[in-house]
Amino acid sequence: MQAINFAARRKKLMQWMGPNSIAILPSATEKVRSHDVHYPFRQDNDFWYLTGFNEPEAVAVLVPGRKHGEFILFNREKDVTQEIWHGKRLGQEGVVEQLGADDAFPISDIDDILPGLMEGKERIYFAFGAHPEFDQNIMEWRSQLQSQSVRGSEPPGELVDLRHHLHDMRLIKSSAEIQRMRHAAKTAAKAHTELMKACAPGKTEMQMEAVLHYHYVQGGCRYPAYPSIVAGGDNANILHYVENADELHDGDLLLVDAGCEFEHYASDITRTIPINGKYSKEQAQLYDIVLEAQLAAIEMIKPGNHWAQIHDKAVEVITQGLVDLKILKGNVKELIKRGAYRDFYMHKTGHWIGLDVHDVGDYQVHGQPRVLEPGMVLTVEPALYISKDNTKAAKKWRGIGIRIEDDVVVTREGYDILSKGVPKTREEIEQLMAQARQQ
């Protein structure tokens, strides 16, 4: 798989920063799960994007034009005893040799060294508010330099939020990044397909979740990209349902919103399947509306179109479908104008995806919807939710929740669906489930 060029990313960012500036980025911290047990460590995505370093207790510093090297890392020292208990560390020599750091210092020395790197810089770039405790350290180092200015040292200048520009960089994926996202999507698609084969009345949401996680690992993806949503029946009308504890009932649908992570990059796929292998008449009618909306919205993805056109097209198709089924009554344009569809479809049609499953990047630029460019990757996920308590629809429609979601990369010609490996039409899903029952 194509290597990621972290050095090129740093160079691009430093060109934007300009001379006489400094950027300071801390790593993620380890999180306690309970007592002395930690959650699996997950690196801060901005830090990893620029360094490729996957240890805690580290700080990356970029100093454009620095004579002795522009990329400096503060990290943990090698420690034989700690490594026996908790795993290998790169140490200072390792980050120079393996990550291309120009200089590396023990993290314990940061208070002595970093203020000197900040001294006299016109701009200090960091992520305001992302790491409040570390923000306080930066303020203290800056105050220390200001107090020393009467003795001849030059205090640093303005504080600037780094994230806006860095997140714009992250929004456009390289071919190496898209390779990783394609693998994550392919693995998740396989997992969804195997779940369809395994699904049956009497099993549980938790058992279906286990099928997903098993096939993630089989595909080389150890972790889910987010807590899996495995929602049977009316649970599908809870948008972020994660209990995954109920039994699956004959005649209900199962909404599965799940993706895995490969080398830090996420996938995010949703399918809604009949637990007994066959959609009912009402389920089929609503499903076809959502699928038509998704296909129409995906067709809006091409360079030069803007973000809002995707959602607008999905809303148009969904509203027309609800009118056709007499769930909504009135003129489609007027219904859209007053947001009548929001009783049944209350979220946007997608989001950016990348290192974060809800990835960074502005959706508007200067008050206007963002124009799509090659290399952007987004989800397309229209839906219909009619809970058991929704009295605005006839009883026959209630208790049905349907969402269909795929990961789509913007190409020079239009789009490429990364998650196309999982069945999506009713006919494909029913056929797959029927074949699995015959085996």
Image (cartoon, rainbow, N blue to C red):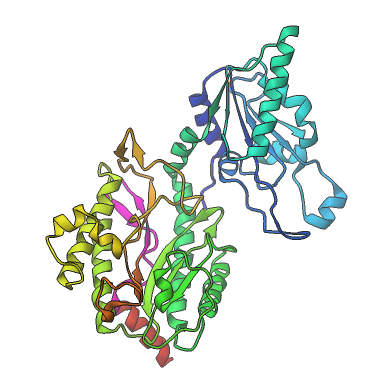
User: Can I make out residue 181 in this image?
Assistant: yes
Please state, as top left, top right, bottom left or bottom right, where the C terminus lies in the image. bottom left
State the residue at coordinates (17%, 72%).
326
* Percent position of residue 38, x then y: 72, 58
Task: Looking at the picture, tell me which residue is in the foreground, 203 or 219.
Answer: 203
* Percent position of residue 36, x then y: 78, 59
State the residue at coordinates (57%, 73%).
214
* Percent position of residue 422, x then y: 39, 70
User: Can I make out residue 152 in this image?
Assistant: no
Q: Is residue 111 above or below residue 222?
A: above
* Percent position of residue 213, x then y: 55, 71
User: Magenta stretch containing residue 368, yes or no?
Assistant: no
Give left or right: position of 47 versus 301.
right
Image quadrant where residue 41 sits = bottom right
Chain part drawn in magenta: 405-427
Residue at the outermost right position: 81
State the residue at coordinates (44%, 37%).
168
Q: Is residue 173 above or below residue 401?
A: above
Q: Is residue 292 above or below residue 120?
A: below
Total labels drawn: 0
Task: Looking at the picture, tell me which residue is in the foreground, 80 or 332.
Answer: 332
